[in-house]
Amino acid sequence: MPGGIVDLSMLQKLIAGAGRDVFAGVFDEPTPEVRAVPERVRGFRVRVDLMYAKPPIWRRLVLPGDLMLDELHVVLQAAMGWQDGHLHKFGVGGDRRRRAYFVTGFDLSEGDDGVVEDSVRLDQVVSDKGERLFYDYDFGDGWEHVLVVEDVLDDPPSAPVCLTGRMACPPEDCGGLGGYEELAAWVRGGYDPRATPMGLGAQEMRDWLPRDWHPDRFSVAETNDALAVLNTR
């Protein structure tokens, strides 16, 4: 630059370029790792926990490895007891801050891109004992689930089956774990009209609850009935 004069426009371009280099990849969403389709289909015995719930709310399931993730979403809704009224996403990676998420059909319609859940099988994201898959549901209430592989089965089931479990699923739209805990305590305490949660009257609250809902109730037979009517196979 003649006479030591600084070209301001060039300096601005250099700074902008440096900024792009500095922040490259910082705000990029991590991409989930998808393994090759295995040569033969196996099954998985898994435990699914609603994270941070006390007492634990969980289900033990037997699943075919060739279940697509969008089919697994339907299975988890039925097995846990949700009503599929909200968005969801699957993720891999133990570190919540760097967890890699699959995208759904809704995400695509919103202009997002990534690895689509309906193109990925369960056995492409887990294969060994101890491996985990995360499932988030209802981003408002913030329900987080973790699926942990307990055993790998040489003979896969023809359809998903629930072996056992504990505790009822929280009612939809109850306000997340805090709202659920308050609601569960009210039901266990005998529906005290002086201590109704959510600012509703006692009868209004009971009418709002799912029929016969009690936090400590779980039926493996009813869960398998719900799984049997699914069209995932």
Image (cartoon, rainbow, N blue to C red):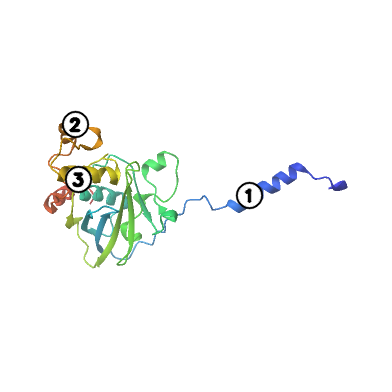
Q: Position of residue 154 (x, y in %)?
A: 23, 68
- The answer to which of marks 3 and 2 sits earlier in the sequence is 3
Residue at point 19% right, 31% down? 201
Name the residue beneath numbered marker 2: 201
Amino acid at the residue labelled 1: Gly
Q: Foreground mark, 1 or 3? A: 3
Give the Cα distance between marks 3 and 2: 16 Å
- The answer to which of marks 2 and 1 sits earlier in the sequence is 1
Q: Nearer the viewer, residue 105 or 81?
A: 81
Q: Position of residue 110 (x, y in %)?
A: 42, 39
Residue at point 29% right, 44% down? 176
Q: Are marks 2 and 1 in contact (CB under 8 Å)?
A: no
Label 1 residue SS? helix
Q: Is residue 33 above or below residue 187?
A: below
Q: Nearer the viewer, residue 185 or 171?
A: 185
Q: Position of residue 45 (x, y in %)?
A: 23, 62
Residue at point 14% right, 53% down? 220
From this viewpoint, is residue 187 visible?
A: yes
Name the residue beneath numbered marker 3: 185
Report crowding for label 3: few under 14, some 14 to 19, many 20 or more residues within 10 A (C-alpha).
some
Label 2 residue SS? loop
Q: Which mark is residue 130?
A: none
From this viewpoint, is residue 41 visible?
A: no
Name the residue beneath numbered marker 1: 19
Amino acid at the residue labelled 2: Gly
